[in-house]
Image: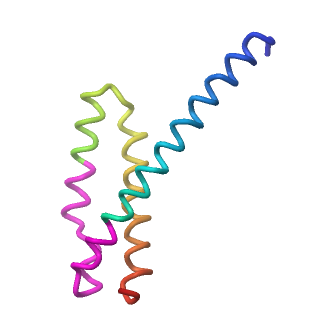
Amino acid sequence: MSPENKIKLNLQRKKLDKLDYQLLKLIKKRTEIVKKVLALKKQKNEIIDNKRISLILKKIRKESLKRNIDPKITHRIWKNMIWSYIDFEKRNFNKK
């Protein structure tokens, strides 16, 4: 890699790092809301709502296409996020 491209690469990586920190702030906010949602659930079987999951993934696909974002990327991100939060809710259900 040329020295000029190495400088450009480092600049782009710094931009990515900045975005990552912004994403972490959003994840923290999302987690706080998930905790409030969990507090409303009375039974553990209320944690997984397959109908809602399907609806969310469809909306994300539609929005991704509208914004010219590869829908495979967003589908994978949201699916992993949803199941990560389901795991979080299951682990924290008995602690509420």
Residue 66 part of the magenta-drawn span: no
**Quarter of the rendering occupied by the C terminus:** bottom left
Residue at (37, 75) in percent of width and height: 89
Q: Is residue 47 above or below residue 15?
A: below
Q: Locate residue 64 relative to residue 76 in the image: left or right.
A: left
Q: Provide residue 14's location: percent of width, then percent of height.
A: 63, 30
By secondary structure, the bulk of the magenta-drawn segment is best described as helix
Q: Quadrant of residue 91?
A: bottom left
Q: Is residue 3 above or below residue 13?
A: above
Closest to the observer, 64 or 88: 88
Closest to the observer, 26 or 44: 26
Q: Is residue 86 above or below residue 66?
A: below
Q: Provide residue 78's location: percent of width, then percent of height.
A: 37, 51
Residue at (49, 50) in percent of width and height: 24
Residue at (43, 72) in percent of width and height: 88
**Quarter of the rendering occupied by the N terminus:** top right
Q: Locate residue 76 relative to residue 56 in the image: left or right.
A: right
The span picked out in magenta is 34-57
Closest to the observer, 3 or 51: 3
Residue at (30, 64) in percent of width and height: 33
Closest to the observer, 29 or 92: 29
Q: Provide residue 47's location: percent of width, then percent of height.
A: 29, 76
